Amino acid sequence: MKTKTVYVCTECGAVTPKWSGKCTSCGEWNTLQEEIQTAEKKAVKSPKVSVFSTQPIHISQIPQEEENRILTGIAEFDRVLGGGIVQGSLVLVSGEPGIGKSTILLQICEQICRNRTVLYVSGEESPRQIKMRAERLGVISENLLILPQTDIHEITARIETESPDMVIIDSIQTMEKAEVTSSPGSITQVKECTSDLMRTAKTTGCPIFIVGHVNKEGSIAGPKVLEHMVDAVLYFEGERFLDCRILRAVKNRFGSTNEIGVFEMTSKGLVEVDNPSKLFLQGKPENVSGIATVGVMEGSRPIIAEIQALVTQTPFPSPRRIASGFDYNRLNLIIAVLEKRCGFFFGNSDTYLNIIGGLRISEPAADLAVATALASSLKDFIIPSDTILLGEIGLAGEVRTISGLEKRVLEAEKLGYTRCIVPKKNKITGFDSQAEIIGVSNLREVFSKI
Ligand SMILES: Nc1ncnc2c1ncn2[C@@H]1O[C@H](COP(=O)(O)OP(=O)(O)OP(=O)(O)O)[C@@H](O)[C@H]1O
Ligand SMILES: [Mg+2]
């Protein structure tokens, strides 16, 4: 059989016969990947689709459907999805190898299988392996059907005939469509299979979860278009060597993308963590410089997190700055403000910043805690362990207002914090809190009040 090499763009999925540094279709650089295609190509059947129409319809005439979500019984999972699984939705669950994608998807079957059927399609593991895991997780049910299959036509046909209430595809990289000549896992295959599954989900109304692996760079293996195609993208992350796992919605057509779900990996599977702050504050050191506490909002929920900074003298001419769980450029900005507005000097020190528990903070409200932790480590003073710091820092060294202050303060109080240093411009009175609330208007003031 003759083979042919083509180049497919991972961003837009465009196919070209020749490699070039820049995709001629979408203009992205270094996105073309080699793919081997066999020359034989069967005609592609175009499937019948009933959701599409040639005539435009008045929005008022579209029959209203009651939003009927399926609850998984795992509150953290439901919350990330925006309140349960939407009928006919296609959800991509992605994450690093061994993080627990198959585990969480098998676990949600437990509750659903009590009165509904689930079809678990596996192209990766044998039915015996899946059974072993299901037994460990306690998910053995008559309503859970296992289908070891990789042919997408077989799978979509099964979904139509068996009409299960939910389908899990583990994983999209192992699925193949016969008409597409490239190998499973290639961009074209992944795109084609997803598009078929999307159609099946929309026509049958059956929600489909697909597992997607991530590649070395940490993005979902396959074209970016895959993320555009699906209704929701959930990303499962966590430190490999810690038990804490965070489920985050990167995209969600039916809910907010800010919500996170926190789990702990145990031998019985993933266990929900109702109070993540407690987990993130576990083992917080006392009477050590460079440690600050902050309250960040993850969706509607406040989480209290620990920030650690270490500033040490370096003999090298170009000092190192490393941020883990925090934006590197934001760290540089905060250091610049500390130097210019408060007279600190970091020029001959290595600076390390770490957010404990594998949490990633992207909120500016953490600025004040980061700045104080850095100054605390540089000057070796201790931030009292009953104090929490909240506020965004401006380039003039001013402490700017943040949203959701009351929620953060109340959460901190629940965990035993009694002093809150907050922006003066925020409304800081009338809280239902016993904690001492100290308003500050600029960074210099913080150091005098600590
Ligand atoms: N007996 C056990 N006790 C505790 N934890 C276990 C046990 N068996 C597996 N695990 C945990 O489950 C993880 C594997 O979970 P799972 O197979 O769901 O991951 P995955 O994301 O689907 O991986 P892959 O990318 O290989 O499909 C392991 O990394 C380990 O942390
Ligand atoms: Mg798996």
Image (spheres, helix red, strand yellow):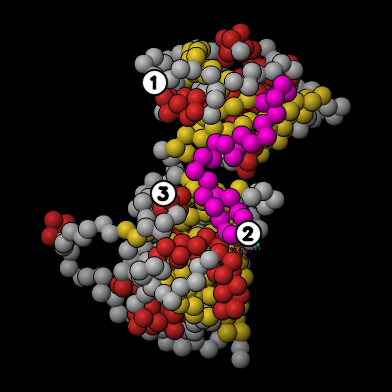
Inter-mark Cα distance, 3 to 2: 24 Å
Neighbours of disc 3 within 10 Å: few (<14), some (14-19), many (20+): some
Q: Dot 1 corresponds to which residue?
A: 432
Percent across and percent down for residue 95 are: 57, 57
Image quarter hosting the C terminus: top right
Q: Residue at x 67, y 52 (%)?
A: 240
Q: Dot 3 corresponds to which residue?
A: 79
Considering the numbered disc 2 on the image, is that residue within a helix, a strand or a loop?
loop
Please report whichever mark, 3 or 2, sits nearer to the chain's N-terminal start. 3
- Mark 2 CB near ligand 1 (8 Å cut): yes
Q: Residue at x 33, y 65 (%)?
A: 88
Percent across and percent down for residue 182 are: 56, 78
Residue 281, visible in the rendered structure: yes
Q: Nearer the viewer, residue 257 or 26?
A: 257
- Quarter assignment of residue 109: bottom left
Residue 18, visible in the rendered structure: no
Q: Residue at x 43, y 46 (%)?
A: 257
Q: Which residue type does callout 3 highlight?
A: Arg
- Mark 3 CB near ligand 1 (8 Å cut): no
Q: Dot 2 corresponds to which residue?
A: 267
Neighbours of disc 1 within 10 Å: few (<14), some (14-19), many (20+): few
Percent across and percent down for residue 323 are: 67, 36
The answer to whether the residues at label 3 and label 2 have Cβ atoms under 8 Å apart is: no
Inter-mark Cα distance, 3 to 1: 26 Å
User: Range of the magenta residues?
Assistant: 263-291
Q: Which residue type does callout 2 highlight?
A: Ser
Residue 280 in the magenta stretch? The answer is yes
Which disc, if any, is residue 311?
Answer: none
